[in-house]
Amino acid sequence: MSALATEQEAARPAVRQAGGLSLALAQGGIEFKQFVRTRESLVFTLLFPVMLMLIFGSIFGSVIITPEGEVPAVTLSQYFVTGMIASGIMATGFQNLAITIPIERDRGVLKRYRGTPMPKWVFFAGKILCVAALAFIAVVLLLGVAVALYDLRLPDTGQKWFTFGWVSVLGLIACTLCGIAFSGVAKTGRSGPAVVTPIALILQFTSGVFFEYKDLPHWMQQFAALFPLKWMCQGLRSVFLPESFASQEVAGSFELGRVALVLAAWCVGGLILCLVGFRWTTKREG
């Protein structure tokens, strides 16, 4: 009898773990359905980056940004695509969560959730799973448009696919954690877009999304280097642009080691900011 009891006791953590995983998956499914049913979020988060790609790609499609004879020719639209993929990841992580969480807080959804017996980590797990699914869809859409219309070449080696994977994952984790942490800045749900959107636009303009990063003013480069988006763009350029294009970077190389270090540091910093700054209730509720 004691042996049976010991086996049951040993099995309980596995049961609890399986139950927690099921709860997280269910919460993730709920978050995804809510997102899809909100047309404004669907258009702004998933379709807006594609629309920008189509507009800027059509304008700059014939502009060559690498001297012929020195490195393989690259059009500005192909350069722009790498930044838009990084921006799509930022939109699904940082912008999406920093805007939607204040709305849920303002409506009392977070307060009611905290009052349920559901573990708090399940709420965040659901958000993360939803963001991961949205980021995957966004990247597939952007890659599909870029390959079909702008002759973007997909990675042709396993190493480049691996680089694409870890840059995307680290960038998504950093943006997701920063989005959760930054959700505490907006005082009300209505003020969320007004607070978050200008920051996202500033980062896009200074991080080499709409323009060549090396042509930006030095102070702007220094500013952008403090945030994840610049490093995501740089890492993705190493994947989708010719290897010889590294000489066109400010440092003369893609600096993948530094890309990994900065993105990992933002993952740690974002987690700390979440633990310190996330709020379940509005400031007026205390």
Image (cartoon, rainbow, N blue to C red):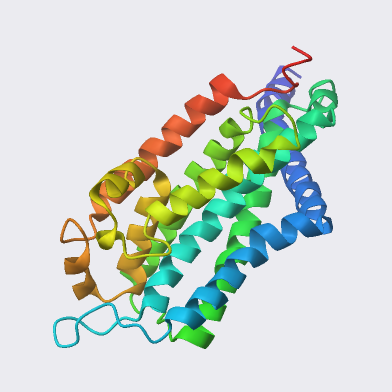
- Relative to residue 277, is residue 177 depicted above or below? below
Query: Extreme front residue here?
Result: 217
**Where, by quadrant of the figure, is residue 81 drawn?**
bottom left
Left or right: residue 152 versus residue 281 is left
Q: Is residue 15 visible?
A: no
- Relative to residue 127, is residue 59 depicted above or below? below
Estimate the x, y position of residue 13 in percent, counting from the top left.
67, 28
Q: Residue at x 65, y 26 (%)?
A: 10
**Where, by quadrant of the figure, is residue 222 drawn?**
top left
Nearer to me, 196 or 9:
196
Q: Residue at x 72, y 62 (%)?
A: 43
Left or right: residue 102 versus residue 257 is right
Left or right: residue 242 versus residue 188 is left
**Where, by quadrant of the figure, is residue 79 drawn?**
bottom left
Nearer to me, 64 or 155:
64
- Relative to residue 36, is residue 149 depicted above or below? below
- The quarter of the rendered structure image containing the C terminus is top right
Nearer to me, 193 or 137:
193
Q: Residue at x 63, y 27 (%)?
A: 184
Q: Residue at x 48, y 25 (%)?
A: 272
Estimate the x, y position of residue 131 in percent, counting from the top left.
63, 50
Estimate the x, y position of residue 233 in percent, counting from the top left.
38, 59
